[in-house]
């Protein structure tokens, strides 16, 4: 039998606050469990299952190619087929939109877990973003298949793309975490979030190039964090696409992304103590 001194219960004011980030590591198994659960549940009881992760971006690419490439005749960002240019923009955008939609409702969807057990609540929205990242990786495989279909050889800068995956993750995690906290307190946001996603699609350079925006408005346009992410993705994939690293709008988007991550974590931690009561 264990000795009386083998197990100790320490009650100390502020201990949870001081050890919050250590607790994130201690509860890493819960993070894996929630992520894997969301992945399995997403396409459960559907006829074609994970194939939806392939059909949705392909259909969206076809619609955008027809509307922006054929009807609107928008200028392209390089010498690649217009479908590839659109898909290069859809990759980070769908990751962002899925993360925003899934993470914003993640706390409400785990009410029983939050009200009964202590763990860093940051784990729940973070696991939702990871789930969306799995769909993103599936879409990236589709992009590689499109290279074969169009017999297009991407530039060597494609090997830099994982660097911008991190930026895309931060751009998705920041707003998603902030809206998650607000959605717990103000349930109106569950109606606002779909509008934000729909509106954001048309003010992001998914179906067109950022070059169509007048120079004097570039700084304002770059306040959208997805502008820098999408431009960076296109530069990695498309030959002769403008290098965003040589322009100031990219760094505005990067600064906005970093600010959103800091603000979201600050706001989330500030409201976290009241989640169990509000939810």
Image (cartoon, rainbow, N blue to C red):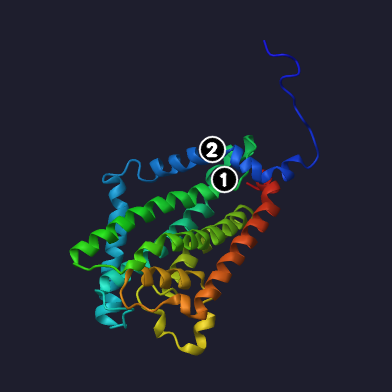
Q: Name the image quarter holding residue 54.
A: bottom left
C-alpha gap between disc 2 and disc 1 = 8 Å
Which residue does the image show at 72% across and 19% down from the upper left? Answer: 6
Task: Identify the mark at residue 30; answer none if there is no mark.
Answer: 2
How many other residues sit within 10 Å of disc 2, few (<14), some (14-19) or many (≥20)? some
Which residue does the image show at 63% across and 35% down from the upper left? Answer: 117
Dot 1 falls on a residue whose secondary structure is: helix
User: Residue under circle 1?
Assistant: 123
Measuring from the top left, give residue 129's x and y in whole percent. Answer: 48, 52
Foreground residue among 235 and 64: 235
Measuring from the top left, give residue 85's x and y in whole percent. Answer: 31, 72
Q: Residue furthest top?
A: 1
Measuring from the top left, give residue 104's x and y in whole percent. Answer: 53, 55
Which residue does the image show at 38% across and 56% down from the upper left? Answer: 136
Q: Name the image quarter holding residue 137.
A: bottom left
Which residue does the image show at 41% across and 44% down from the upper left? Answer: 39
Pointers 2 and 1 in contact (C-beta within 8 Å): yes
Foreground residue among 107 and 94: 94
**Counting residues from the N terminus, which is met first, the one under dot 2 or under dot 1?**
2
């Amino acid at each position: 039998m264990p000795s009386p001194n083998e197990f100790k219960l320490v009650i100390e004011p502020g201990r949870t606050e001081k050890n919050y980030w250590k607790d994130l590591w201690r509860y890493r198994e819960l993070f894996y469990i929630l992520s894997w659960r969301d992945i399995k549940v997403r396409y459960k009881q559907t006829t074609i299952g994970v194939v939806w992760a392939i059909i949705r971006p392909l259909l969206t690419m076809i619609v955008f190619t027809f509307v922006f490439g054929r009807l609107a005749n928008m200028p392209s960002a390089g010498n690649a087929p217009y479908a590839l240019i659109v898909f290069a923009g859809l990759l980070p955008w769908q990751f962002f939109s899925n993360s925003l939609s899934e993470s914003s409702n993640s706390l409400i969807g785990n009410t029983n877990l939050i009200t009964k057990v202590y763990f860093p609540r940051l784990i729940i929205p973070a696991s939702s973003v990871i789930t969306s990242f799995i769909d993103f990786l599936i879409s990236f495989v589709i992009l590689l298949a499109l290279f074969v279909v169009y017999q297009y050889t991407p530039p060597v800068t494609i090997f830099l793309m994982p660097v911008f995956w991190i930026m895309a993750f931060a751009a998705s995690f920041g707003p998603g975490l902030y809206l998650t906290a607000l959605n717990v307190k103000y349930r109106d946001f569950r109606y606002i979030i779909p509008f934000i996603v729909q509106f954001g699609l048309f003010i992001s350079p998914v179906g067109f190039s950022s070059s169509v925006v007048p120079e004097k408005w570039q700084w304002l346009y770059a306040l959208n964090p997805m502008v820098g992410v999408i431009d960076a993705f296109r530069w990695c994939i498309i030959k002769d696409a403008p290098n965003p690293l040589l322009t100031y709008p990219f760094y505005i988007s990067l600064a906005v992304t970093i600010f959103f991550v800091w603000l979201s974590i600050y706001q989330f931690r500030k409201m976290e103590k009241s989640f169990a009561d509000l939810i």
